[in-house]
Amino acid sequence: MASTNWIINATPGRDVRAVLPDNFRLESGQGLAAGEIVGRLHGPEQGPLVFVAGGISSGRFATLWWSWAVRSGGPIDPERVRVLAFDLLPGPGESGITLTTTDQARLLALLLDSLGEPRIDVFVGASYGGCIGLAFAAAFPDRIGELAVISAAHRAHTAATARRGVQRRLLAFARDCGREAEGIALARELAMTTYRTADEFALRFASTPPAEAGDPYPVCDYLIARGAEYAGATSADRWITLSDSLDRHAVEPEAVRCPLTVIGFTSDGLVPIEDSRDLAARAPNLRRLIEAPSIFGHDAFLKERELIGRALHDLLSPLTHLQSREIAA
């Protein structure tokens, strides 16, 4: 844990906060126990503002969960643009909350108000973050310049809902049995099988049987390790809420009027490429649809550095060129 704290402390940036109004209500009509929204801002005092959001396990430390993309000299360079990310709500102590991607977009708007920022120049969202980006663009069209969504679409696919539904029932069962941490670990193991592809598992792991029935196979050892790493990262109730939020996600592509870049992967088992194509076909201001194969499936947004890095460079370079000219003037 000490090494992780060192990395966080060594990362340039500052936490920013917005007080959650007492009268704030989710679309469900519920309130949140959290008293504030917490984000982290990197970069110069002035300059274009880029908001970054990732999967449901991401948060304000974008330089950690997307370290290859958000770094000095990287595709999203905090030395050339201001980079903002925030912690998704609800917090780990809340239960029984029903929340939507539009609710997350409204929370982001409150954080922007607190910072005195009228708009985001570019919103880069991957997985759940891409869903929030679409919701933000639809709800606040005057507060966004451009949007890039990666491994995300305008709706949840029924097959993905089926898989996440099993995870939620597993989480609730373990919580109610008093074995929450074990349930979170098992749910993470199951989730990993949906994030990656059969081809990757076949290439990485031998099919050698263990000595006795019930013992783990090589691929199981990998999944068990991933689950153990995640057991303390969240609560069952928070995961249930955010997972359910994904399955409630629905935005009409026609409502996303800002310039839109869509990046999808043909092997993604959670966001089928057909949904990315449908989003692109119906968006009124499509800038670019990028689709590619990847052995990493849904996790391609974390792993396909060259393709995504090039796309982000193309998207953000006009902002940094404009900034350079303004500084020179």
Image: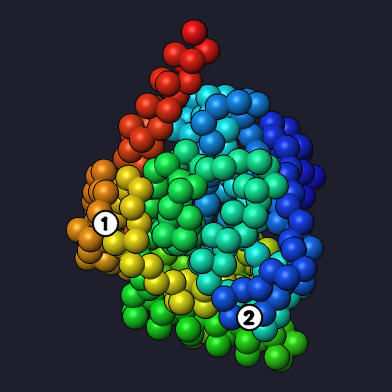
Q: Position of residue 172 (x, y in %)?
A: 63, 87
Tell me the tag on residue 283.
1
Residue drawn at point x = 73 percent, y = 37 percent: 14
Camera-side residue of 80 and 189 = 80
Q: Is residue 52 left or right of residue 196?
A: right
The answer to whether residue 246 is seen in the rendering is: yes
Q: Is residue 69 above or below residue 281?
A: above
Q: Position of residue 146 (x, y in %)?
A: 39, 43
Tell me the tag on residue 7.
none
Q: Is residue 46 left or right of residue 22?
A: left
Q: Which residue is mark 2?
A: 29
Q: How many marks?
A: 2
Residue drawn at point x = 52 percent, y = 84 percent: 214
Circles 1 and 2: CB atoms closer than 8 Å: no
Mark found first going from the N terminus, 1 or 2: 2
Residues packed near mark 1 inside 10 Å, few (<14), some (14 to 19) or many (20 plus) = many
